[in-house]
Each structure stands twice: as C-alpha cells, then as structure tokens.
C-alpha cells in the first residue's frame, strides 16, 4: 500500500559504526528568533528598559535533545559540542527530581507538652511521638494507653481503697485511654483524651484536655485539664513507670490532673526549669489512699477556691528522658526537683511539699522521692467531710532498677515508707516492698510487666494484703 503524499519517506536506520569510530555530532539547536519589542512589549525582560539591546540567542541554553531509542529512562544526550562517551558505554542515570524550591521541606517538629501529659515526647531526645500525621501546618498524633491486668494472687485483706492493686484473683482493665495530640503552626500544642473505663461502673470520663502556647522557650503556657507540676512520679506518664503502679505515697499525696493554667520555662538545655500555676482548689477524699479527686470542672469551680503551685527543677547533665527506666542506656544524667502547693479549699486548706531525684546511667536508674502533706479542715466546710482535726502525712520512696537493652528486659525494686497521720500510730502506718520485671517487645510502646508487692503494717494487726500483678500495655 502506498503512503499518503504528505508523509515523509521512510528513512533506513543507520548501520552501527565500529567501536573505533566516534558517533556523529548532532547539529546544534536552531537559534530562537527574538520577538520585536516594538510589536510585543511583553518580550522585554523585566528590569530591561524598552529599546535596550536584546542578548544574542547564543547566550540561551541549548534545547534539550531527546535520547536515542533504547536509552534508560531519564537519560539525556550531552549538550552540543561536548564529547560523547565511547560506543557501548552506559549513560549515567538522570538526577532525581527536586521538589519546588530545590530542597525538601524540613520535617515538622512537635511542640513541647506539659510534663506528665500523654502527649509528651515518647523517645529519648525525640521531637515528637513515633506515629504522627502532618497536614499542612497541623501535626497530629494518636494517644492510646491500654493496660490489661491479671492478678494471679491477692491476699484476703487486700482492698483497692487501701491502695492495693487487686482484691482477688482475676482480671482488670486498669486503663483504656484514647485521644489525640497535636501541634498547630509549630508552637500551639494541644491534646484531648478520655478514659473509657474510668470509674467503678466502667463509665467514661475526661482524662486531659488542654491548649498550650510554646512560642518562647522561657515561658510555655498551658491551660485546661492537665497534670499539676508536683512530684516527679506523678508528672511521669501512667505508662512510663518501671513498675506497674506508681508508689502508694504518690497516688495518695499528689493532686495529679486538675483544671487550671501554669507557665513553665527551661534554660540552658533544661539545666534550670521553673513551673508556676493556678488551679481549682484540690479536693481530698476522706479515705487517705484514695488520694485527690481529679475534677474535670465541667460546671466550674463550685465548692473550692484556688490552688497555687510552684516547682523548681534542674537537669545539669542534659535533658532527662520521659520514662523512669533508662531505656536508652544513656550516659549519666541527673534530674532533681522541689515542689510546693497551697490549696485554699472550701473544705480543707492543704499544704504540700515534695522533693525528688532521678539518676540514669548505662541502663541503671535510681529514684528517691519525699512527699509531705498537711490538711486543715475549714470551720464552715462547703462539702460534708469526716475530717475534724489537722492531719499531717509523710511518704518516702526509694527505687532502683536496671535495663538490659540487648535482651529488652528490665528489673526494678521499690521500697516506700508511708505514715498517713503523724499524730496516730495504727495499721495504716507501714512500708511496702515491690519487685518487678518488664519485657519490652517494641521499645516502650508494647511491653509486659510482672510485679510482686509485700506490705507490712508498722502497728496494729498485720494484714494479708500482698499481691502479684501481671500487665500487658500498649502505649502510643
């Protein structure tokens, strides 16, 4: 069949020249004829006055020449006049394409969260959580804390109201917390999470909900329901301890999460830090081991005045990681702090003092903490109370442990002395010894723990309240 008249005649392919002969040079690209500025003023380059001489076409870069058939994708022939590689040589691959601007945008960094928040950085020295999503100027990360417990053994005198981990053999959902944390524009952190099984009837309740402004390193402001900066163990996340539960003294004498605001500042890589805040007045339970009521204040501050908190801290050898254990097997690091609060409550006026020291070195950790509370009942309480006289409480905690990174196993032991009322000598006074082990499947995200606790009453009748607890934890 004949080709149409307008078609070009088929050219036979050239025979491949011998290796010794150079390939023919391609003809230079045809110069582009500049447009006449008189007829097209837009053709004048910006900043060049009309009527100025137009640069010659030779100054423009030559047009790109398509590669021959069979060349690798992205390959291009050299510019006209350049020496060609020998026949049979492989052309170099094309350089990877750069994003607009010539460089990839830097990864978004999470703004700091208040100490104790589940939104705090998860890894030693990390700028944010291990799982996060970036959407423009918004950075989001999930907050998930699931702690499923089993109690193979619990003494017949063990009671949850007395601070024991279980009252009998069986299983318990210790925590089922879910939410999300985020950062807007790099300096507005926020978080909200709920406890899906927070009460005895497994009812849901608010865990934390706060907004921060962390634009200046010397003054980070946090407002909402978040941890009161008092006691290192209380400020450490619920899933970041070396043992399953926090110390008895801390659970009974630290106010934990309340609604209010505080400002904190950090200087010289946390060599010095300060915290100062104001919260709704703290409400204590009449049962000492039940501790302070964590009030979300959805109806505001109804029965109490306000509480004032201050803390000074130092980490002279570098910032301390999030967890109590030395999971990073780091060089020696030291953290120390002193805290004070005064709660001008409607039912009780409470003073609290705390001091703590945490040491990390090559996988070992050592923690010492002292807590002191004094509670004075009001003459005209705004809520019913069984407290009729001032009560002074004292707690002392000492903990040591070692983490073997190679086998992902940590062992810890904790001793604590607790006297709920220094003016009375009864069976509530005593000491507790807890020993445990933790195996970390995935860093501190997924781990299994086993603890044994022995409690000994200093006065009165000795109780059978020892317990063995197992826990599987997912912490995002």
Image (tube, rainbow, N blue to C red):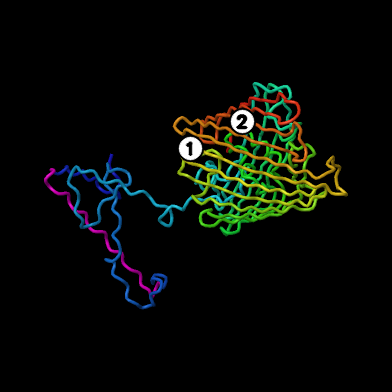
Q: Nearer the viewer, residue 180 or 53?
A: 180
**Magenta stretch encompasses residue 29:** yes
Neighbourhood count class around disc 1 (C-alpha, 10 Å): few under 14, some 14–19, many 20 upward: some
Q: Quadrant of the N terminus?
A: top left
The percent coordinates of residue 195 (x first, y second) are 69, 37
The percent coordinates of residue 129 (x first, y second) are 54, 43
Residue 363's mark? 1
Left or right of 32? Residue 147 is right
- CA gap, disc 2 and disc 1: 20 Å
Q: Nearer the viewer, residue 427 or 320?
A: 427
User: Which residue is rendered at x = 46% and y = 29% of the image?
Assistant: 407
Question: Which numbered disc, 2 or 1, marks the residue closer to the eye?
Answer: 2
User: Which residue position holds label 2?
Assistant: 434
The percent coordinates of residue 246 (x first, y second) are 64, 36
Give whichever of discs 2 and 1 has the lower sequence position.
Answer: 1
Q: Image height check: is 439 above or below 20?
A: above
Q: Image height check: is 35 above or below 353?
A: below
Magenta region, residue range? 18-40
Is there any visible trace of residue 185 in the rendered image? no
The percent coordinates of residue 344 (x first, y second) are 78, 52
**Magenta stretch encompasses residue 17:** no
- Disc 2 is placed on an element classified as strand
Is there any visible trace of residue 346 in the rendered image? yes
């Amino acid at each position: 069949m004949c080709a149409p008249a307008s078609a070009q005649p088929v050219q036979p392919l050239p025979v491949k020249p011998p290796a010794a002969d150079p390939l023919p040079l391609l003809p230079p690209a045809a110069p582009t004829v500049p447009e006449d500025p008189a007829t097209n003023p837009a053709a004048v380059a910006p900043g060049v006055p009309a009527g100025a001489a137009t640069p010659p076409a030779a100054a423009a870069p030559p047009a790109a020449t398509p590669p021959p058939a069979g060349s690798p994708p992205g390959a291009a022939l050299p510019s006209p006049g350049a020496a060609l590689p020998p026949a049979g040589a492989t052309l170099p691959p094309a350089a990877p394409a750069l994003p607009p601007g010539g460089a990839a945008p830097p990864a978004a960094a999470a703004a700091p969260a208040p100490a104790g928040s589940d939104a705090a950085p998860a890894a030693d020295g990390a700028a944010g959580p291990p799982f996060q999503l970036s959407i423009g100027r918004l950075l989001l990360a999930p907050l998930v804390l699931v702690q499923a417990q089993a109690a193979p053994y619990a003494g017949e005198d063990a009671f949850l109201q007395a601070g024991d981990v279980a009252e009998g053999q069986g299983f318990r959902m210790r925590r089922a917390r879910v939410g999300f944390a985020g950062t807007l524009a790099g300096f507005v952190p926020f978080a909200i999470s709920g406890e899906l099984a927070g009460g005895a009837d497994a009812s849901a309740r608010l865990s934390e909900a706060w907004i921060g402004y962390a634009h200046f390193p010397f003054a980070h402001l946090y407002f909402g329901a978040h941890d009161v900066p008092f006691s290192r163990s209380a400020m450490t996340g619920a899933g970041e301890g070396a043992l399953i539960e926090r110390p008895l003294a801390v659970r009974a004498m630290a106010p934990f999460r309340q609604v209010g605001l505080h400002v904190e500042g950090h200087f010289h890589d946390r060599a010095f830090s300060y915290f100062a805040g104001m919260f709704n007045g703290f409400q204590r339970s009449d049962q000492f081991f039940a501790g302070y009521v964590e009030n979300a204040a959805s109806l505001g501050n109804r029965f109490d005045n306000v509480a004032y908190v201050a803390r000074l801290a130092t980490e002279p050898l570098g910032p301390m990681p999030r967890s109590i254990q030395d999971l990073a097997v780091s060089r020696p690091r030291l953290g120390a702090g002193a805290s004070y609060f005064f709660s001008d409550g409607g039912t009780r006026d409470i003073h609290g003092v705390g001091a703590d020291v945490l040491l990390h070195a090559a996988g070992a950790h050592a923690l010492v903490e002292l807590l002191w509370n004094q509670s004075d009942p009001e003459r005209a309480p705004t809520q019913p109370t069984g407290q009729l006289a001032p009560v002074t409480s004292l707690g002392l905690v000492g903990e040591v442990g070692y983490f073997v990174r190679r086998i992902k196993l940590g062992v810890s032991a904790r001793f604590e002395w607790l006297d709920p009322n220094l003016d009375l000598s009864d069976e509530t006074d005593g000491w507790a010894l807890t020993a445990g082990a933790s195996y970390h499947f995935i860093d501190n995200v997924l781990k299994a723990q086993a603890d044994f606790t022995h409690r000994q009453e200093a006065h009165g009748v000795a109780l059978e309240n020892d317990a063995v607890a197992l826990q599987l934890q997912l912490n995002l």
